[in-house]
Image: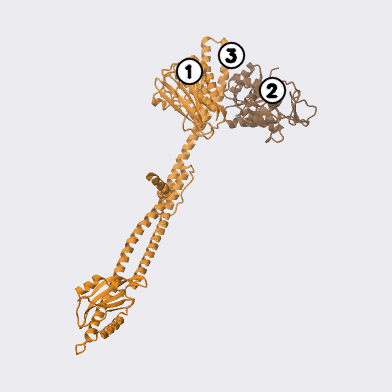
C-alpha cells in the first residue's frame, strides 16, 4: 500500500511539482492550498505524512502545525525558505518532526519522507521500563502507572531508541542518524527541541529530567529503571 | 642611582600631573592662586617696607629733636651753674643735669642716658661720668664715640640693639657734646627704646600677612566658583557628546538664556538633531536594503525549488532526450546548483550585515576538521593535479568554535588554493598556542599582487575576471569567511606574491571572549614538504599525511 502525503503549500506550481515528483516515487498525494483546507483534509483523507509550508496565507504554518498536533501524531515535515534559527525552532516546537530548507534536493526530500514513514525498528523486548514509565513496544504505547501518555511516532521512536540501550550515551549526531535517518551531519537543534518536547510529556519535572538525562558535552541517555514496576522485564 | 631617584619622583608626581593635565578647574585655580599670591607678596612687601621706614623716621625725628633740646638744656644748665666767681660745683650740676634728663626723657620706653668724659683731656677738675643704672655701656659703639669727638658741633645718632631683661630691643642712641666749665668736654648719650615702634610694625606686618592670605584665598575661591560656573556647560556638552557617541541619539543639552553658553547649547542640539536624523535615515535605508536582499533571496527560493524539482523529473527521463536537449538539461542543472549556492551566500551575507548571526559553539578538534575538509575536496584537487598535504604543528586539543563556520572558512581557502594552485602542492598547516589556534592554507600557484591581495575580501571581487573557475565561487566566499572569523573574535590574514603563491591564515581564540594578538603560525608558515618552487618533497615525518 502506498503512503498518502498531504502537501500543504500556497504556491501552486511548487505544490504541483512536488506532487509530480512524489507520485514518481510511488506516493499518493493530496494538495491543500491553505491551513483551513489542510485541517479539513487531515480528517477526510487521513494522510500518512504532511508536508507543510511554513509561509501560508491566512493561518500561519506554525499554527497549522500546532493544530494538527492537537488532533494527530501524523509525521509533519516543514518546508521552509529560512533556515534561520527562530523559524525552524518555532516550527519544531510546534510539533514538526523534521524540516527541509528550500530549495531542497528532491532526493533529500524523499529520503526525509521515507525516514518518517519507515516502520519503527522492531525490538526484541516487548516491554521496556525506564524510571517510572513503561514502554509497550508492540503496542506503540507509553504508560505511567497504567495511564497512557500520548506520544507522536517520532517521540516514541526517540524514547525507544534511548531506552533500548539503557547505559549508552547517544550523541545528537547518532540520534539524528538512528531516529531521523540522516546519513550526514545535520541540524542538532532537531534533537534538542524534540528531547524538550518529549520531556514535557513524560517527565514529572521536565527541569530535572530522570527519564531522558542530558550528559553535558556528549548527548543523552535514558534513566535507570525503577525496580518497583512489577512483571516487567528490563531491556537487555 | 640618579635615574632611580628620578623615576621615583616621577612616579610620585604622576597623580598630580594627571590632575593637572585633566582638570581645567584645578589648573585655573592653581595658576590664579600662584599669580595673585606673587602679586600680593610684592605689594605687601612694599607696603611693609614703606610703613617701617616712615614709622622709624618719624620716631627718629622726634628723638633727634628731643635730644637736641635736652643737649641744649643740659649745656645751659652747666653754663648757668658757674658762679659769678667763676667757680662751679660740677657734681651738683651733674646731678641736676641728670634730673633734667630724666624729666625730659619722659617719652615711653626704658631708654637711659650716659654722660661720659671724653678721654685724653687735662682739666682743672673732673666730673664723675654717670649713666643710668643697669645700662650696658657697650651699646655705645667706639665709632659713635669717635664721631662725636670728631664733630662735636652736631648731633649724632646710631641704631643699636639694647639688651633689656635678657632680650635685645631696637633702640637709637643720640650723641652730643657738652662743655662742662673747668671740667672739660663730656659726651652726652641719650638712649631711646624703639620697641614700641617695633611692636607697631610687627602688628602692621601681621595684619598685612593675614590680609594677604585672606585675599589670595578669596581670589582662589572666586576663581574656583567662576570657572566652575563657566565650565559646567562645557562639561555638560562634553558628557552629552559622549552619550551621543555611545549611541544614545536622544541625548540633548538643556537650553536657557541668551548668552554664549545658550548659543553653544542650541548649536550643539541642532547638530545632534541633524546627526540623529541622518543616522536614523541611513539606518532605515540600510535596514531596508538588508531586508530587501533577505526577502529577495527568500522569495527566489520557492520558484527555484520548483525549477529544481522540474529539472530533476526531466533528468530522470534523460534517456528519452536527444543529445542537445540532454546537454541543455545538464547545463540547467549545474546553473540551478550555482544559483542556489549564490542565494545561500547572499543570505548569509545579509544575515551578517543585519548583525543577526548567532554562532553555535562547541568543542571542535581543528586537526580533524581540517583533515575532513581536505578529504572532502580531495577529488577536486586530484582532478586539478594538486596534492593536498597536512602539516600539523600543534592544535590537537579542542577549541571552542562553531564547527560549521570554521569548516566553511577552511573549505573556502582550500577551494581557492585548488583554483589558483596551478597543479602544485597545497599544504594545510595547523598550530596553536596558549590563547589561539591557527589554520593556514598555502599554495604555490599564480599568487597576487599586493594591491590585489588587499581586495580579496571585497564582495564579488575577482583577481582576474578572465581566469577560469572550477569550484564555482560566488564571489562572496572570502567576505563570508572573514565575517565567520570576526564573529569568533578571530581574524584572517593573507600573504601573496605573484608567481610564488598565496597563503590564507585564520587565527581564532581558543575560547569564547578570547582575543587574538599573536598568531601561532607564520605568514606564510615555513615547510619542508614543498620547496620554494612548489615541488613536493617526500615526507619523512610520520605526522604528515597525504590525502
Q: What chain does badge 2 belong to?
A: A
Q: What chain does badge 3 belong to?
A: B
Which residue matches tag 2?
A48
Q: Quadrant of residue A234?
A: top right
Residue B536 pos. (x, y %) = 45, 16
Q: What chain does badge 1 belong to?
A: B
Q: Colour of chain A?
A: brown
Indicate the quadrant containing the C terminus of chain A: top left, top right, bottom left or bottom right: top right
Work out which residue is located at the far bottom of the displayed protein and give it.
B84
Which residue matches tag 1?
B470
Determine whether label 3 and label 1 are within 8 Å by CB: no
Q: Nearer the viewer, mark 2 or mark 1?
A: 1
First of labels 3, 1 by sequence position: 3
Q: Nearer the viewer, mark 3 or mark 1?
A: 1
Q: Colour of chain B?
A: orange
Instruction: Mark 1: give few (<14), some (14-19) or many (20+) Cα within 10 Å.
Output: few
Instruction: Establish if B60 lies above or below B297.
Output: below
Residue lying at 48% horizontally and 35% vertically, measured from the top left: B285
Q: Are marks 3 and 2 on the same chain?
A: no
Amino acid at each position: 500500500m502506498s503512503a498518502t502525503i498531504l502537501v500543504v503549500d500556497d504556491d501552486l506550481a511548487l505544490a504541483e511539482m512536488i506532487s509530480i515528483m512524489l507520485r514518481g516515487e510511488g506516493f499518493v498525494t493530496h494538495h491543500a492550498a491553505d491551513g483551513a483546507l489542510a485541517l479539513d483534509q487531515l480528517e477526510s483523507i487521513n494522510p500518512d505524512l504532511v508536508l507543510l509550508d511554513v509561509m501560508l496565507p491566512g493561518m500561519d504554518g506554525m499554527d497549522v502545525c500546532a493544530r494538527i498536533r492537537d488532533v494527530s501524531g501524523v509525521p509533519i515535515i516543514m518546508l521552509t525558505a529560512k533556515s534561520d534559527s527562530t523559524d525552524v525552532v518555532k516550527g519544531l516546537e510546534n510539533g514538526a518532526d523534521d524540516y527541509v530548507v528550500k530549495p531542497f534536493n528532491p532526493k533529500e526530500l524523499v529520503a526525509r519522507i521515507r525516514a518518517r514513514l519507515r516502520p519503527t525498528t522492531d525490538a526484541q523486548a516487548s516491554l521496556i521500563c525506564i524510571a517510572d514509565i513503561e514502554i509497550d513496544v508492540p503496542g506503540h504505547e507509553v504508560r505511567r502507572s497504567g495511564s497512557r501518555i500520548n506520544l507522536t511516532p517520532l517521540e516514541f521512536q526517540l524514547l525507544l531508541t534511548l531506552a533500548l540501550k539503557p547505559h549508552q550515551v547517544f550523541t545528537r549526531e547518532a540520534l539524528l542518524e538512528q531516529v531521523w535517518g540522516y546519513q550526514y551531519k545535520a541540524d542538532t537543534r532537531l534533537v534538542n527541541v524534540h528531547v524538550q518536547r518529549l520531556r514535557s510529556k513524560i517527565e514529572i519535572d521536565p527541569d530535572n529530567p530522570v527519564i531522558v538525562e542530558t550528559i553535558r558535552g556528549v548527548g543523552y541517555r535514558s534513566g535507570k529503571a525503577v525496580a518497583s514496576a512489577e512483571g516487567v522485564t528490563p531491556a537487555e | 642611582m640618579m635615574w632611580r631617584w628620578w623615576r621615583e619622583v616621577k612616579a610620585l608626581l604622576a597623580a598630580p600631573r594627571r590632575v593637572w593635565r585633566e582638570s581645567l578647574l584645578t589648573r585655573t585655580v592653581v595658576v590664579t592662586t600662584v599669580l595673585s599670591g606673587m602679586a600680593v607678596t610684592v605689594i605687601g612687601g612694599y607696603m611693609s617696607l614703606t610703613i617701617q621706614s616712615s614709622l622709624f623716621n618719624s620716631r627718629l625725628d622726634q628723638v633727634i629733636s628731643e635730644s637736641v633740646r635736652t643737649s641744649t638744656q643740659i649745656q645751659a644748665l652747666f653754663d648757668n651753674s658757674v658762679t659769678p666767681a667763676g667757680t662751679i660745683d660740677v657734681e651738683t650740676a651733674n646731678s641736676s643735669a641728670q634730673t633734667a634728663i630724666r624729666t625730659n626723657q619722659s617719652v615711653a620706653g626704658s631708654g637711659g642716658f650716659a654722660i661720659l668724659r671724653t678721654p685724653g683731656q687735662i682739666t682743672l677738675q673732673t666730673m664723675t661720668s654717670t649713666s643710668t643704672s643697669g645700662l650696658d655701656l657697650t651699646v655705645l659703639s667706639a665709632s659713635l664715640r669717635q664721631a662725636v669727638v670728631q664733630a662735636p658741633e652736631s648731633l649724632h645718632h646710631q641704631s643699636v640693639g639694647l639688651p633689656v631683661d635678657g632680650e635685645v630691643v631696637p633702640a637709637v642712641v643720640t650723641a652730643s657734646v657738652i662743655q662742662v666749665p673747668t671740667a672739660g668736654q663730656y659726651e652726652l648719650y641719650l638712649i631711646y627704646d624703639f620697641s614700641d615702634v617695633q611692636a607697631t610694625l610687627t602688628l602692621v606686618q601681621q595684619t598685612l600677612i593675614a590680609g594677604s592670605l585672606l585675599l589670595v584665598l578669596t581670589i582662589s575661591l572666586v576663581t574656583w566658583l567662576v570657572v566652575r560656573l563657566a565650565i559646567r556647560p562645557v562639561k555638560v556638552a562634553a558628557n552629552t557628546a559622549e552619550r551621543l557617541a555611545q549611541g544614545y541619539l536622544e541625548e540633548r543639552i538643556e537650553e536657557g538664556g541668551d548668552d554664549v553658553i545658550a548659543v553653544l547649547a542650541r548649536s550643539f542640539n541642532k547638530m545632534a538633531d541633524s546627526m540623529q536624523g541622518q543616522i536614523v535615515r541611513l539606518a532605515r535605508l540600510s535596514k531596508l536594503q538588508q531586508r530587501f536582499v533577505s526577502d529577495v533571496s527568500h522569495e527566489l527560493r520557492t520558484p527555484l525549488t520548483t525549477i529544481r524539482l522540474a529539472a530533476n523529473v526531466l533528468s530522470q527521463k534523460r534517456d528519452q532526450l536527444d543529445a542537445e536537449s540532454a546537454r541543455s538539461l545538464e547545463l540547467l542543472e549545474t546553473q540551478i546548483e550555482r544559483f542556489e549556492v549564490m542565494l545561500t551566500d547572499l543570505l548569509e551575507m545579509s544575515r551578517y550585515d543585519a548583525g543577526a548571526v548567532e554562532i553555535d559553539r562547541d568543542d571542535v578538534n581543528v586537526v580533524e576538521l581540517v583533515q575532513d575538509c581536505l578529504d572532502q575536496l580531495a577529488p577536486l584537487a586530484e582532478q586539478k593535479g594538486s596534492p593536498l598535504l597536512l602539516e600539523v604543528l600543534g592544535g590537537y586539543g579542542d577549541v571552542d568554535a562553531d564547527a560549521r563556520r570554521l569548516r566553511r572558512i577552511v573549505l573556502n581557502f582550500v577551494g581557492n588554493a585548488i583554483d589558483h594552485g596551478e597543479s602544485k602542492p597545497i599544504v594545510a598547516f595547523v598550530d596553536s598556542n596558549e590563547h589561539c589556534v591557527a589554520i593556514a592554507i598555502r599554495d604555490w600557484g599564480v599568487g597576487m599582487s599586493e594591491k590585489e591581495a588587499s581586495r580579496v575580501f571585497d564582495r564579488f571581487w575577482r583577481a582576474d575576471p578572465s581566469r577560469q573557475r572550477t569550484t564555482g565561487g560566488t564571489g562572496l566566499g572570502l567576505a563570508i569567511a572573514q565575517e565567520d572569523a570576526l564573529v569568533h573574535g578571530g581574524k584572517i590574514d593573507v600573504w601573496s606574491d605573484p608567481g610564488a603563491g598565496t597563503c590564507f591564515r585564520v587565527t581564532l581564540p581558543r575560547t569564547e571572549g578570547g582575543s587574538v594578538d599573536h598568531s601561532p603560525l607564520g605568514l606564510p608558515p615555513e615547510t619542508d614538504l614543498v620547496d620554494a618552487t612548489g615541488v613536493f618533497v617526500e615526507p619523512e615525518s610520520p605526522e604528515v599525511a597525504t590525502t
